[in-house]
Image (cartoon, rainbow, N blue to C red):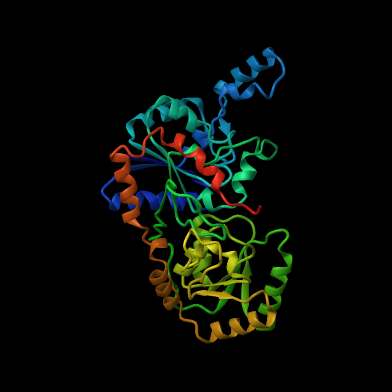
């Protein structure tokens, strides 16, 4: 078997997820190739897509002629040419499975990644999606994506032939049976995620998010009143730079509710506690909750939940500083969340075996539209 993994090369979670997946495949003895410009190539604007943007045939002709030779720049800030696109499409015929590593809503918006449908029309190859989470437990995302007024319309679960997810746990329950999803976690074994045992206790404040200022105000006040050193993230960082910052700090303060939060994992691997005002700000990290349940679960021992209470946060900070052992934080993470460190090879192998047996194929997506009606939203 040979697997194509399509991702991007900009900072974010897609690249480490893609590389982690190729590592997991290698550990299973499966050949794979990572395409860091794969999403940009899937998103190449075809000439047919220009018809809605111009009014006359002459304008369409001029614009499509220019488009034929002009490199395209996309949301992924990568440049590809039509020649690269043609070579890429031809290359896909060599693979038995194509894995797209992307996020909601981009992975499902009709006008994005249109190359998925084109490749499907050219080859009978299963195309699956690898995300941190699964659309079936993302609440209102499905309803928002398919509305033409929001993103110009989109797909539901019928876009891909199978799904890989790091976690399917959230506050929204998974309903129905036969969901086409394998929970494989993450492979984050990397020397750049290391524990610095000789560092002062220092807090890293996650990027600010508009509308969440009141939570940041309490965090700042607690840090100042306890005399705790801190750094606020702002601007842009390379993966190397941001992981170096994680290693220099001792705790991460969340700024908003995370859909998954790869930094939550990376910080714990660097020996850092995770502070959150509420448990439901990190729902994908519940330890004892089943996907079919709709209540909250318990978070791991490295989480400090302070119910957005100033005095409680101050007390937790003082206690953490007094009893801080970064290597112990990492060991607790590896013990409680092994699937987020080494990945779940067993779940990945079961999915690959289904592809080999023909149970997952290039037309499997046609069976999944009926599952959309069971996605639970806010009502």
**One can see residue 29 in this view:** yes
Asked if 29 appears above or below 292 in the picture, the reply is: above
Asked if 279 appears above or below 27 in the picture, the reply is: below
Q: Relative to the observer, which residue lies in front, 107 or 235? A: 107
Q: Position of residue 257 (x, y in %)?
A: 62, 62
Q: Position of residue 159 (x, y in %)?
A: 50, 37
Q: Position of residue 147 (x, y in %)?
A: 66, 39
The residue at 44%/49% (across/down) is 177
Horizontal relation, residue 215 to residue 87: left or right = right
Q: Position of residue 19 (x, y in %)?
A: 40, 50
Asked if 52 appears above or below 224 in the picture, the reply is: above
Q: Relative to the observer, which residue lies in front, 97 or 21? A: 97
Question: Given the current orientation, which residue lies at the most extreme left position?
Answer: 29
Q: Where does the N terminus fall, quadrant-wise?
A: top left
The residue at 48%/56% (across/down) is 168
The residue at 71%/63% (across/down) is 212
Horizontal relation, residue 347 to residue 254: left or right = left
Q: Relative to the observer, which residue lies in front, 153 or 239? A: 153
The residue at 60%/25% (across/down) is 49
**In terms of image quadrants, where is residue 274?**
bottom right
**One can see residue 1 in this view:** no
């Amino acid at each position: 078997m040979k697997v194509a993994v399509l991702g991007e090369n900009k900072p974010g979670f897609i690249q480490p997820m893609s590389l982690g997946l190729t590592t997991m495949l290698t550990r299973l003895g499966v050949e794979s190739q990572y395409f860091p410009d794969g999403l940009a190539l899937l998103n190449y604007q075809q000439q047919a897509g220009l018809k809605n943007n111009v009014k006359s045939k002459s304008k369409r002709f001029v614009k499509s002629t220019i488009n034929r030779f002009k490199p395209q720049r996309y949301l992924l800030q990568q440049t590809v040419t039509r020649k690269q696109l043609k070579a890429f499409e031809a290359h896909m015929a060599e693979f038995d499975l194509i894995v797209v590593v992307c996020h909601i809503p981009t992975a499902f918006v009709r006008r994005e990644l249109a190359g998925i449908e084109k490749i499907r029309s050219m080859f009978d190859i299963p195309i699956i999606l690898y995300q941190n989470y699964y659309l079936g437990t993302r609440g209102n995302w499905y309803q928002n994506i398919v509305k033409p007024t929001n993103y110009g319309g989109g797909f539901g679960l019928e876009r891909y032939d199978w799904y890989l997810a790091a976690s399917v746990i959230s506050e929204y329950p998974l309903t129905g049976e036969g969901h086409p999803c394998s929970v494989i976690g993450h492979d984050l074994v990397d020397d750049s995620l290391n524990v610095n045992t000789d560092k002062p206790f220092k807090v890293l404040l996650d990027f600010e998010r508009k509308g969440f200022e009141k939570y940041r105000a309490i965090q700042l006040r607690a840090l100042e009143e306890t005399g705790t050193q801190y750094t606020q993230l702002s601007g842009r960082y390379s993966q190397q730079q941001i992981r170096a910052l994680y290693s220099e700090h001792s705790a991460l303060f969340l700024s908003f509710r995370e859909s998954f939060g790869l930094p939550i994992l990376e910080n714990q691997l660097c020996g850092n506690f995770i502070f959150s005002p509420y448990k439901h700000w990190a729902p994908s990290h519940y330890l004892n909750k089943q996907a079919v349940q709709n209540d909250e679960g318990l978070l791991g021992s490295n989480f400090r939940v302070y119910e957005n209470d100033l005095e409680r946060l101050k007390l937790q900070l003082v206690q953490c500083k007094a009893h801080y052992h970064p290597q112990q934080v990492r060991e607790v993470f590896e013990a409680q969340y092994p699937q987020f460190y080494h990945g779940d090879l067993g779940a990945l192998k079961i999915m690959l075996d289904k592809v080999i047996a023909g149970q997952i194929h290039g037309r499997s997506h046609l069976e999944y539209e009926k599952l959309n009606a069971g996605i639970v939203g806010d009502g």
